[in-house]
Each structure stands twice: as C-alpha cells, then as structure tokens.
Image (tube, helix red, strand yellow):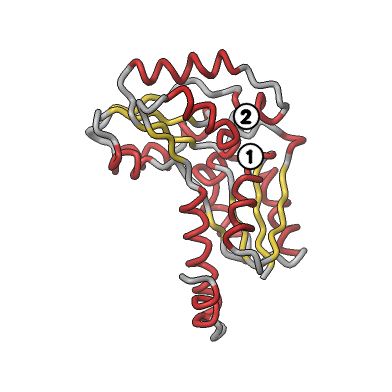
C-alpha cells in the first residue's frame, strides 16, 4: 500500500519516519510545501487553496491513505478536505486529552501555531477535556520558521519553555510536528519537572486502524492484522 504523508515542511518527516519504522512493508510518500511556510499564520481559506491541490496530486500518484502531519491543517480544514479528497485522511491534533489525564499540578502547556490556537477544534478540545485545567500557550509563532531554516534561537525557546514551568506546568504538548525536532532540548529544559508529549505513536496506531478497516472492506483485514500485530 502507498501511504501519503503531508506537512507544510520538514516537521512531518518525523511522522513519516515513525510510519516507515512501524510499517516497513508499506511504501511511504512524503510531500511538503516549504514554498508557502509558515502555515501557522495563514487563514483556513488560504490553507485550503494550498493543501487541496497537493493532496489531490498524491491521490493521482496512487496514495490510498494520507496522513495530514500538520496540526494547523487538521484543526482548521480537515473536514473540508475530507469532502473533496477520495481517500481516507488521518489527521493530527493537539494532545489536550492525554495531557489533562497526565497532569498532577492541574497546569499544562500547549506549544502550537497561532492558527491552531485560534481554531474552533482546539477550543473544543479544551472545553471537552481541560475545562478544570489551566492551559498555558507560550508564543511559538516563529518556532516553525526557525526549525525549518535551521536557525534555532535556543535561548529564546528556553526562556519561553522555562516560563511555563515557572507557572506550574508539568505536561508540555508539542502541537506542531516541527517541534518534534527539538523535543530533546525541551526534555532537557524540563529536567524531570514535566513530561513532553507528541502524537507520533498515536498517529501510527490510528493509521493502522484505518488501513485494517480498508483491508477488511476488501477481505484482507485478517492478514494485515496478523502481519502487523494489531
């Protein structure tokens, strides 16, 4: 099976790598849109105009399922994309629910783009799972660009992350795949004071479920399940 993975830039490569490791017998095709970075400051209409043609081209290339490895795209336009793209789409969104379950201090931090933070889906996640929890949202508006261009201002990021620890956060949610590439640095800053979570494992699990459902529809479900130990 040909699995597509899409992100605005190099961030989603971490997701593509995780999928390749988990499903080594499947073909993973990665597409990004570096030309139009950053996505995190664009409107939903702008995102739809950029993303839809790319996903359609991936379908034309034979992708049977596509992972949207971008929180910004998932939280704003995945519903519209699903209406127009003929293959299953697996999205990625901020891990507010598990963070709310993990926290002992009652304070979590969500590191995300401005567009993700402003999305109706993100607000819904907070209302549903974190109504009684303080959710800190540090300014990460330029992180994606810094990481994409390999011009990371570690001092600035350290200060922003340290500020959420000073306010009691004991869980940090990386809600942009670009941020996965600096998880080790954030773990180091945390120094055992907090856990840092990101959704690669959850995405792989959901992708396996979707593929299993697809194979069951064609009578291949049991063989896929056995093959991949689902």
Front in this rendered view, residue 73 or 25: 25
Residue at left offset 37%, top offset 28%: 192
Residue contact between numbered discs 2 and 1, judged by CB atoms under 8 Å? yes
Of 141 and 165, the residue lying toward us: 165
Q: Which element carries disc 1, helix, strand or loop?
A: helix
Residue beneath the point at 69% across and 39% down? 10
Residue marked by disc 1: 11
Vertical relation: 224 (above or below) 55: below
Residue 170 placement (x, y as % from top left): 33, 29
**With respect to residue 71, does 207 lie above or below?**
below
Hey, which quadrant is residue 96 in on the image? top left
Is 19 placed above or below 155 here? below
Sort mark 2 into few (<14), some (14-19) or many (20+) by Cα contacts within 10 Å. many
The residue located at (38%, 37%) in the rendering is: 123
Front residue of 218 and 147: 147
Residue tagged 2? 144
Question: Residue 219: where, in percent of width, then height?
Answer: 54, 86
Residue 80, x across and y down, in percent: 55, 52
Residue situated in front as seen by the camera: 230 or 134: 230
State the residue lying farthest toward the bottom.
Answer: 219
Task: Determine which quarter of the picture holds residue 58.
Answer: bottom right
Tell me if 114 is positioned left or right of 149 in this view: left
User: What is the C-alpha distance between the residues marked 2 and 1?
Assistant: 8 Å
Question: Left of 4 or right of it: where is 206?
Answer: left
Q: Dot 2: what SS?
A: helix
Residue 27 location in percent, x, y? 70, 64
N-terminal of the two: label 2 or label 1?
A: 1
Counting the numbered discs, the total is: 2
What residue do we see at 37% from left, 24% from top?
A: 136
User: In the drawing, does residue 197 fall left or right of residue 114?
Assistant: left
Outermost residue to the left: 132
């Amino acid at each position: 099976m040909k699995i597509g993975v899409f992100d605005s830039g190099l961030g989603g490569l971490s997701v593509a790598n995780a999928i390749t490791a988990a499903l080594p017998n499947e073909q993973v095709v990665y597409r990004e849109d570096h030309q139009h970075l950053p996505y995190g400051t664009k409107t939903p209409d702008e995102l739809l105009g950029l993303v839809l043609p790319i996903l359609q081209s991936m379908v034309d290339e034979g992708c049977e399922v596509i992972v949207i490895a971008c929180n910004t795209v998932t939280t704003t336009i995945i519903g519209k994309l699903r209406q127009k793209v003929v293959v299953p789409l697996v999205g990625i969104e901020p891990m507010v629910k598990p963070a709310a379950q993990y926290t002992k201090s009652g304070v979590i931090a969500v590191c995300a783009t401005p567009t993700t933070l402003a999305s109706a889906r993100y607000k819904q996640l907070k209302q549903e799972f974190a109504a009684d929890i303080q959710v800190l949202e540090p300014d990460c508006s330029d992180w994606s660009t810094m990481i994409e261009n390999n011009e990371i201002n570690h001092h600035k990021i350290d200060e922003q992350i340290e500020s959420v620890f000073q306010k009691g956060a004991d869980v940090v949610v990386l809600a942009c795949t670009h941020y996965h590439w600096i998880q080790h640095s954030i773990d180091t800053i945390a120094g055992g004071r907090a856990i840092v979570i990101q959704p690669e494992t959850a995405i792989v699990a959901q992708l396996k479920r979707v593929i299993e459902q697809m194979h069951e529809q064609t009578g291949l479900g049991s063989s896929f399940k056995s093959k991949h130990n689902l």
